[in-house]
Amino acid sequence: MTQPSAEQYVESLLTRDEQLEQVKAGIRSRNMPEISIAPGYGKLLTLLVKMTGAKRILEIGALGGYSGICLTRGLGDGGKLISLELKQEYADVAHQHLINAGLGDKVEYRIGEALPHLQQLEDEGQKFDAFFIDADKGNYPNYLEFAIRLANPGAIILGDNALMHGRAMDEKQQGNAVTKMRQFNASMASDPRLEGVILPAYDGLAIARVR
Ligand code: DHB
Ligand code: MG
């Protein structure tokens, strides 16, 4: 018998999560991409929202609502998640999954390209305590700049897929998405406006706090 990987071992300690299993089943049954965040990172999102006391969260990329449930679970009474999603169809699926999880009243979806919505949120004077970036990789540096502008002091910023299946550290890879991810990772780790680190498990998760 082969030994489990570190990730398999740690996952085996987590209790089965019926709401998140339903999200995965809903994504699969609709032939949507099966690229929700890893279970351990989902748990981490909930914990970080709770530990920081974040009240207003902005998510960029909803997909089927897996990360949306994890983020929203961390919110106390009166907390709110605004989730930007390119596709109406995905936002509808995500919304249904949050409703099923009893979290539907805490979330607002805005549909379409994220950058104009981010400009709109800035124009509205909206501020957030936590950000989760999990959308088109070529725009991660743009999303980060908006997150910093929309951040309350001490806000946390998280970015999924920092490693891009290993392409981030493969110098032969020079496409736009991976180049922009390297730029994003470098900023998350050492931009003077941030204090951050990259977790290398699964596909990598970048975490920073806005100074
Ligand atoms: C992939 C995974 C992701 O989590 C994502 O946001 C985009 C793409 C992938 O495995 O291709
Ligand atoms: Mg992702």
Image (cartoon, helix red, strand yellow):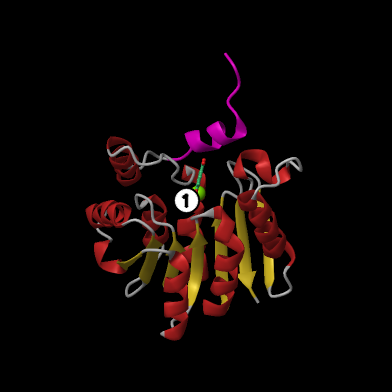
Quarter in which the C terminus is drawn: bottom right
Q: Nearer the viewer, residue 5 or 125?
A: 125
On whether residue 47 falls in the magenta region, the answer is no
Residue drawn 74% across the image and 65% down it: 190
Which residue corresponds to the image point at 38% horizontal and 69% vertical from the top-left?
82
| Residue 130 locus on image (x, y percent) | 50, 69
- Which region of the structure is painted magenta? 1-14
Judged from the image, the secondary structure of the residue bearing numbered disc 1 is helix
x 72%, y 69%: residue: 191
Tell me: 33 left or right of 186: left
Q: Magenta includes 8? A: yes
Q: Which amino acid is tagged 1?
A: Lys
Nearer to the camera, 158 or 40: 158
**Which of the two residues, 188 or 8, is positioned nearer the viewer here?**
188
Residue 46 rendering spot, x and y as whole percentages? 45, 58
Disc 1 marks which residue? 43
On the image, the x and y values in percent for residue 24 come to: 35, 40
Residue 78, visible in the rendered structure: yes
Farthest top residue in view? 1
Q: Position of residue 177 (x, y in %)?
A: 61, 51
- Residue 39 is left or right of residue 82, and the answer is right
In the rendered image, the quadrant that contains the N terminus is top right
Say if 139 sits above or below 29 in the image. below
Q: Is residue 80 above or below residue 61?
A: below
Q: Judge left or right: residue 6 versus residue 125.
A: right
